[in-house]
Image (cartoon, grey):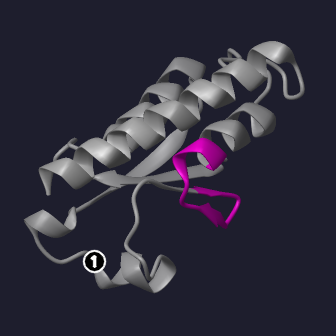
């Protein structure tokens, strides 16, 4: 059975959706997908906002459990599917700390860039 359902942006503009999509593909984790409008392209499906009132993307559902933060999603994919081509260093290692630090930096820079744009 397929355990993972991925909600991503319909137009492929969201870099966090892209990051999770690449991780799913690289790890070869079977998943189903729903493409959701970003707010700038129209209303989100009522079935989606019933599950995720904030409308935040990306969203991953594993065995019925929802997650909305891309860093949490990426980490969860590594821990739930350790035999599927690991992409992150093991938790608690210096390399994983460095990866986590770089991911936080990337998130901060992107957020500031988006604030500047909008």
- Where 90 falls versus 19 (above or below)? above
Quarter of the figure with residue 71: top right
Coordinates of residue 99 in the picture (x, y in percent): 65, 22
**Neighbourhood count class around disc 1 (C-alpha, 10 Å): few under 14, some 14–19, many 20 upward:** few
Q: Quadrant of the C terminus?
A: bottom left
SS assignment at label 1: loop
Q: Is residue 64 magenta?
A: yes
- Where 93 falls versus 77 (above or below)? above
In this view, the residue in front, 117 or 62, is 117
Q: Is residue 86 left or right of residue 71?
A: right
Residue that label 1 marks: 45
Q: Is residue 16 left or right of residue 117?
A: right
Q: Residue at x 67, y 66 (%)?
A: 64
Q: Residue at x 89, y 27 (%)?
A: 92
Q: Is residue 31 left or right of residue 66?
A: left
Q: Is residue 33 visible?
A: yes
Residue interval drawn in magenta? 61-72
Q: Is residue 50 magenta?
A: no
């Amino acid at each position: 059975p397929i355990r993972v359902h991925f909600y991503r942006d319909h137009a492929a503009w969201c870099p966090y959706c892209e990051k999770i999509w690449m991780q799913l593909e690289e790890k070869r984790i079977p998943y189903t997908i729903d493409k959701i409008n970003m707010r700038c392209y129209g209303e989100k499906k009522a079935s989606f906002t019933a599950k995720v009132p904030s409308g935040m993307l990306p969203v991953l559902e594993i065995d019925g459990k929802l997650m909305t933060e891309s860093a949490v999603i990426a980490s969860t994919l590594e821990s739930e599917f350790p035999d599927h081509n690991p992409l992150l260093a093991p938790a608690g290692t210096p390399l994983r700390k460095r990866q986590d630090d770089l991911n936080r930096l990337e998130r901060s820079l992107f957020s500031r860039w988006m604030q500047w744009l909008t």
